[in-house]
Image: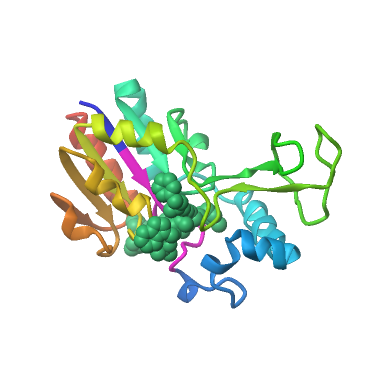
Amino acid sequence: MKIVVLTGAGISAESGLATFRDADGLWEGHDPMRVATPEAFAAEPDLVHRFYDQRRARLARVEPNAAHRALARLEASVGDDLLVVTQNVDDLHERAGSERVHHMHGRLRSAWCVACGERHDWEETLGDRPPCPACGSASLRPDVVWFGEIPYGMDAVEEALWECDLFVAIGTSGQVYPAAAFVHWARHDTLELNLDASSTSSDFAQARRGPATELVPAWVDELLGSA
Ligand code: BV8
């Protein structure tokens, strides 16, 4: 059975990473949806760098949770039949042991040089304008997809959704496209695992409510017949 799992901020909430809807959705009083834009980066690069430098620093202080680990366990059992497509820019799936993870909105721990186009694994800050390790120019930006930009690897994602027998959405509010449309691109069975109802809950064949650290291990046990 081929499975595509879409994850959102809700799967990392119990690891201590704020979702976009938490804190009435504001960061330092700014709407993240406004900070996460090329326009904001052009107008206020220091503000945007601070937003991502803080989140990158926070990432070093959190750990994967039981939901991330359950998906890694599922991958260990079904191998290439599972693809995790995440909207999250954190690396908790990989730190839990998942290898088949596609970051459609980019990664916090990666810097992209807009001068030479090179990408670099990056753990530190970008606000102090460090030079690009390849070309030396101070043109590094967070390697994340901002609103109005094209998500990464959409052709492969579209094909995987077309091919899959089961599409599962975990911890996402279904408010950001094209991820929110995936349930319509999947042709067969669909399941939503989420704390609250999302904007697309009614489009799923089945929806279960609860925290990811409970729902995801239970679903994986059920799938692997170890329930
Ligand atoms: C694009 C990276 C063209 C940066 C992000 C169609 C209609 C309307 C608008 C559009 C449209 N098409 C495009 C748009 C514009 C825009 C968009 O969708 N705007 C919205 C606001 C209306 N989309 C774009 O600009 C995209 N680009 O469309 O290009 C294109 C399209 C197709 C093919 C080719 C080209 C680019 C969008 C990417 C922006 N970058 N992130 C960063 O992270 O800073 S988006 C960012 O916000 C996240 O990555 C994520 O995608 C989104 C947040 O959503 P969620 O992850 O779902 O998190 P949220 O907080 O909302 O919800 C959490 C959920 O978890 C809740 O439901 C809650 O109940 C649940 N939960 C909480 N705790 C738990 C839990 N569940 C379980 N357990 C828990 N413990």
Screen quadrant of the C terminus:
top left
Query: Looking at the rendering, which quadrant does residue 58 occupy?
Result: bottom right
Left or right of residue 172, residue 167 in this image: left
Residue 190 on image: x %, y %: 19, 44
Q: Residue at x 15, y 40 (%)?
A: 189
Give the camera-side residue of 58 and 187: 187
Give the camera-side residue of 30 and 93: 30
* Residue 14 falls inside the magenta stretch: yes
Residue 2 on image: x %, y %: 24, 27
The residue segment tinted magenta is: 5-21
State whether residue 129 is above or below residue 224. Answer: below
Quarter, ligand 1: bottom left
Q: Residue at x 54, y 72 (%)?
A: 31
Q: Is residue 9 visible?
A: no
Residue 24 on image: x %, y %: 46, 76
Residue 176 on image: x %, y %: 39, 58
Left or right of residue 85, residue 198 in this image: left
* Residue 80 falls inside the magenta stretch: no
State whether residue 106 is above or below residue 146. Answer: above
Screen quadrant of the N terminus:
top left
Q: How is the image coloured?
A: rainbow
Q: Is residue 121 visible?
A: yes
Give the camera-side residue of 32 and 77: 32
Residue at far left of view: 205
Count of labels shown?
0
